[in-house]
Every structure is written in structure tokens, then in C-alpha cells.
Amino acid sequence: MERSSEDKEVYYVRFRPNWPKEVIPWWIPTCTKEIPPYLYATLNSQAILCSKEDRLTLNENYVWISNHYQAYPIDAQGWKNSIRNNMSLNKKWFQKLERKPTQKSVGKGSYWTLYPRAEQVFIESLTQEEEYYKRNKENSNT
């Protein structure tokens, strides 16, 4: 059965002169196994924002997070399930892009990217210390 032109998915290409983004997070781990105070959506977006092509496969996302936050070892499965579910369920932030046969990186899975409206939201969550974290940090120091 042949698909009509109305059934075909449209892929939008965005030109981004300042890509990848240089995002300097407000939080830096004090020990190697410290879990970051970011939501999984924020970790996903940080990986995408720092990627060269403004998109990552799920596996590339896992590798980036594991390399930058040692609390998430690449051989552990639990956090990966959470990452995958988070991207699939947060459709207002993350867009799934099917791979085309002509693309250089042929393999299993789709690419994931951020919708343009989500970029600044996640940049702010990475660079501006959250109020709840400030309060908890102050309470633990008293």
C-alpha cells in the first residue's frame, strides 16, 4: 500500500549558527558518585544541547550522561529505562526524528532533539540554581 503525501512525516531542518550550545551548569558534583539535582528531562536536554548536530540517539544520550555524571554508570539499566521513558512521555519538549537511510550514522533507533521552545527552558534550569535546592542546602548547613 502506497502512502499519500498527506500521510508522510515532515522533517524540519533548523539552521543554528550557535550550535552546539556551551552550557555551564550551576551544579558541579563534589564527589564522583553524587547524583545531580536535575530532572531526567534536564539531563536529556543537556546532552542534546551539547551535541554537535543538535540531536542524539538514545544510546548516544546514555553515553553522554554516563560520561558527565558518574552516578549513572553505563552498565546500569534502571536509570536508562527512566531516561527512555522520560523522553517518550515528554512530547512537548522532545521530538523523535526517524533516521533516513542516507544518513551517515546508520544504526538502530531514532534521533531525539529538542523543540526550539524547550531550549531556553532547559538552559535556564541548568544555569540557574533552583530555589528548592538552595533551601535544602541552607537547611542542611544549619
Image: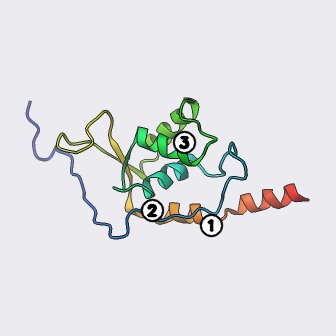
Name the mark nearer the viewer: 3 or 1. 3
Which residue lies under the disc numbered 1?
A: 128
Cα–Cα span, label 2 and label 1: 14 Å
Residue type indicated by callout 1: Gln
Q: Nearer the viewer, residue 2 or 31?
A: 31
Residue type indicated by callout 3: Ser
How many marks the image carries: the answer is 3
Report the residue that reaches farthest toward the bottom. 17
Secondary structure under tag 3 reads helix
Q: Nearer the viewer, residue 96 or 80?
A: 80
Residue drawn at x 27%, y 42% as measured from the top left: 105
Cα–Cα span, label 3 and label 2: 21 Å
Name the mark nearer the viewer: 3 or 2. 3
Cα–Cα span, label 3 and label 1: 22 Å
Residue drawn at x 38%, y 62% as measured from the top left: 116
Which residue lies under the disc numbered 2?
A: 119
Question: Horizontal and vertical percent for residue 56?
Answer: 38, 47
Q: Residue 66 bears which disc, if any?
A: 3
Res 71 → quadrant? top right
Q: Earlier in the sequence, mark 3 or mark 1?
A: 3
Secondary structure under tag 2 reads helix
Secondary structure under tag 1 reads loop
Q: Nearer the viewer, residue 69 or 120?
A: 69
Residue drawn at x 25%, y 38% as measured from the top left: 106
Residue drawn at x 68%, y 52% as measured from the top left: 29
Question: Horizontal and vertical percent for residue 14?
Answer: 28, 62
Res 61 → quadrant? top left
